[in-house]
Amino acid sequence: MGFRDIAMFNDSLLVKQAWRLLKHPNSLLHKVFKTRFFPNCTFMEAKHSSGGSHAWNSILHGRDVLLRGCRWRIGNGKAMSICQDHWLPRKNMPQVLSPMVETLAGAKVEILIKEDTRQWDYRLIDGMFTLEEADLIKSIPLSRCKAKDTLFWPFISNGIYTSKSVYRFLKSEEQTEIGEEQRAQIKELWRKIWSLQVPNKIKNLVWRACRNSLPTKDNLVQRPIIESLTCDRCK
């Protein structure tokens, strides 16, 4: 019926704050949080700590969600990890899957670029990656000038984050985790519910029951709206 998953919607709002810290380093928000929580590193390198406030830890959770969806646009390659970051131009599995030797586990993409000519080092790439990934990397165009690496949001045409696009991304992640057979069964269940020859209020009641959104005491305690699970009638 168009109602949003509250947990996912909350995550999308947390990602919004993380995006602001990432894209506006001169803002008051960034200056305050940097002084307090990550004075010696960048926001992307900041780590969770037991001494962090609830607001800060929540923003770090939003950053983790952001990193799952964001993609890197290659500039000089100094900010991107070969193994850990999402920089390959493919929709699924944008991380490198080729096996890496331990000495290159923390290497940056810059080692794959010839600094003098600003071109890929084909010989090095062919020796490090599988044939498919090597061809994919060599197809990425490089800037002639030494621009910085930048993060962009690939699920919207202008590459700029929106809460709606993050919510859709999280929903698509959830659907990917559900098997095809189970997804077909769920779809058939909803088709049968909405085709019932009953008043709409009955369909709505069934929908709310299936989504566990009825105001049962269990749900009201979790919100929290009430404090006790005890039945008012039988105690």
Image (spheres, grey):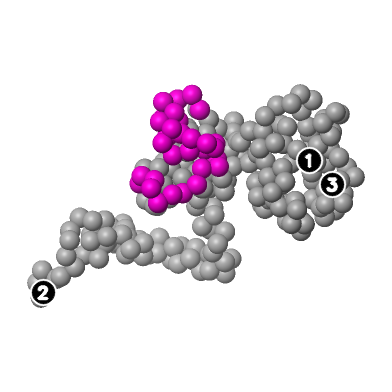
Query: Which residue is identified by label 2?
Result: 235
- Quadrant of the rendered structure where residue 79 is? top right
In the depicted structure, whether residue 106 falls above or below residue 228: above
The numbered mark at residue 87 is: none
Would residue 184 be seen by someone viewing this image from the given angle? no
User: 68 or 165, which lies in front?
Assistant: 68
Are circles 3 and 2 on residues that touch, CB within 8 Å?
A: no
Q: Residue at x 54, y 52 (%)?
A: 172
Q: Give percent across and percent down for residue 133.
A: 79, 50
Q: Give percent across and percent down for residue 189.
A: 45, 67
Nearer the camera: disc 3 or disc 2 = 3
Q: Give percent across and percent down for residue 161.
A: 52, 35
Query: Which residue is identified by label 1?
Result: 111
Would residue 32 be seen by someone viewing this image from the given angle? yes
Of callouts 1 and 2, the N-terminal one: 1
Q: Which residues are magenta?
A: 25-54
Q: Amino acid type of disc 3?
A: Ile
Q: Amino acid type of disc 1?
A: Ile
Q: Give percent across and percent down for residue 166.
A: 50, 43
Label 2 neighbourhood size at 10 Å, few (<14), some (14-19), many (20+)?
few
Decide if residue 49 is on the left or right side of residue 143: left
Q: Residue at x 80, y 41 (%)?
A: 112
Q: CA distance from mark 1 to mark 3?
A: 10 Å
